[in-house]
Image (cartoon, rainbow, N blue to C red):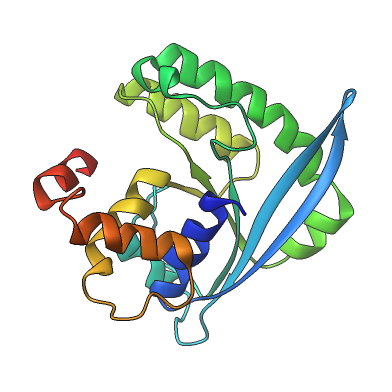
Amino acid sequence: MNVEFDLVRAYFEQNGFWVRLHEFSFELGKKITPFPYFEIFNPTNSPKNQTESFRIFTGDLPKFSSAIVSLIGWNNTGFSSDMLTSDVRIMKFFRKQIEAFKILLNENVVLSLREGKKFFLILPAIPKSDAKTKELFDLFKENGVDGVLTMSSLLENLLRKSSEIRQPLGNSSFYLLKLLKAYGLATEPQLNIFD
């Protein structure tokens, strides 16, 4: 069980998308690197040809009817809470991740999946500095990424929706968020950290 995968699935499902998880592995040096990705599809959304921000929020989702979404998560990449306090560490971490994505994005399997679809990444964090964030976004754009979401934005959206949904749709991670909120362990003032 991968909690991050469950959260990503719950996020897109709660926002009207059908979600299919795939996992693809490729060799990077001596190491086999997993590449989890999600195909998302919402037939009721019609793609909008308006200028989009590179950073995507929940309000932007109706602009997309389908996309390929990949997760750079905590579980499979070595990202740690120590990195959250240092833009330099975050940038170094993402530069290494981009090297892996360069190889992967040229694989035939991935190229065929991406045909005609946007490619988004879900990131564990972004730099606090606007200059470093711009630098990071430019690096991703140069390497075929069409937009990014952050895990904190996904969690914030799911926490807000958790009290609205009576049944958590069989997703244990979503149910856990609902419990945290019900017992006051995730209260409204704490949600302000995501702003």
Vertical relation: 16 (above or below) 95: below
Vertical relation: 49 (above or below) 147: below
The x, y position of residue 31, in whole percent, is: 85, 27
Name the image quarter holding the C terminus. top left
- Residue closer to the observer: 62 or 50: 62
The x, y position of residue 64, in whole percent, is: 48, 70
Q: Residue at x 71, y 37 (%)?
A: 101
- The answer to whether 18 appears left or right of 81 in the picture is right
- The answer to whether 126 appears left or right of 114 in the picture is left
- Residue closer to the observer: 140 or 165: 165
Q: Which residue is drawn at 37% across and 59% down?
A: 176
- Residue closer to the observer: 95 or 9: 9
- Image quadrant of residue 142? top right
Q: How many marks?
A: 0
- The answer to whether 22 appears left or right of 3 in the picture is right
Vertical relation: 99 (above or below) 18: above
Q: Residue at x 46, y 37 (%)?
A: 124
- Outermost residue on the front side: it is 183
The x, y position of residue 127, in whole percent, is: 38, 25
The x, y position of residue 122, in whole percent, is: 50, 47
Name the image quarter holding the N terminus. bottom right
Residue 14 visible: yes
- Outermost residue on the bottom side: it is 44
- Residue closer to the observer: 170 or 45: 170
Residue 50 visible: no
